[in-house]
Image (cartoon, rainbow, N blue to C red):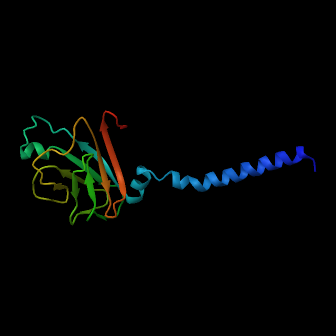
Amino acid sequence: MSASSITPRVAATFLAAGAVVSALALPASADDGHYRQRQAGVEISAVQADSPGRDDRSNRSLNAEWVEITNTTRRSIDLKGWTLRDEQNNRYRFGDVRLQGGATLRIHTGSGRDTRRDVFQNRRDYVWDNRSDTATLRDEHGRTVDTESWGRHHRH
């Protein structure tokens, strides 16, 4: 065999091996926040970081600052031990909360009585920076389920 006939065969072998390696590596490279979100079936669906009106730290104003999460599956999901955090590491830990399939839950900053649709962090100060912040939802094992960023220096 001549060297000129070996070179195309070697090149074809390397190309085929590269295609197999790329195909095998694809699921690992897809493991970003959106991939995990689909696995968990829960996503951050809306954020109101700037409560309407004056920021006077009244309970009404604090409760007008919220994050919504939605269960995109048909089955209910137990949120006990899940957390919601901001960039300054303010953390809300979910208690005995079950999010029904297709349901949305609003997490308010201020105080109130928890229901199936609304839970309250019972804070006396604002959590979310209305200019720039990131909400991070993690499951009970600390794995990031979804993130939502807004403002300068963030992709929407």
- Give the quarter of the image for residue 82: bottom left
- Residue 116 vs residue 74: left or right? left
73 vs 150: above or below: below
Report the residue that reaches farthest toward the top: 152
- The residue sitting at 11% across, 34% down in the picture is 53
Q: Nearer the viewer, residue 20 or 67?
A: 20
- Residue 110 vs residue 132: left or right? left
- Give the quarter of the image for residue 71: bottom left
19 vs 56: above or below: below
- The image shows residue 144 at horizontal and vertical percentages of 36, 55
Q: Nearer the viewer, residue 116 or 86?
A: 86
- The residue sitting at 89% across, 43% down in the picture is 4
- The image shows residue 106 at horizontal and vertical percentages of 21, 51
* Observer able to see residue 110: yes
- The image shows residue 95 at horizontal and vertical percentages of 20, 64
Q: How many marks?
A: 0
- The residue sitting at 21% across, 43% down in the picture is 128
- The residue sitting at 8% across, 45% down in the picture is 60
Q: Quadrant of the C terminus?
A: top left
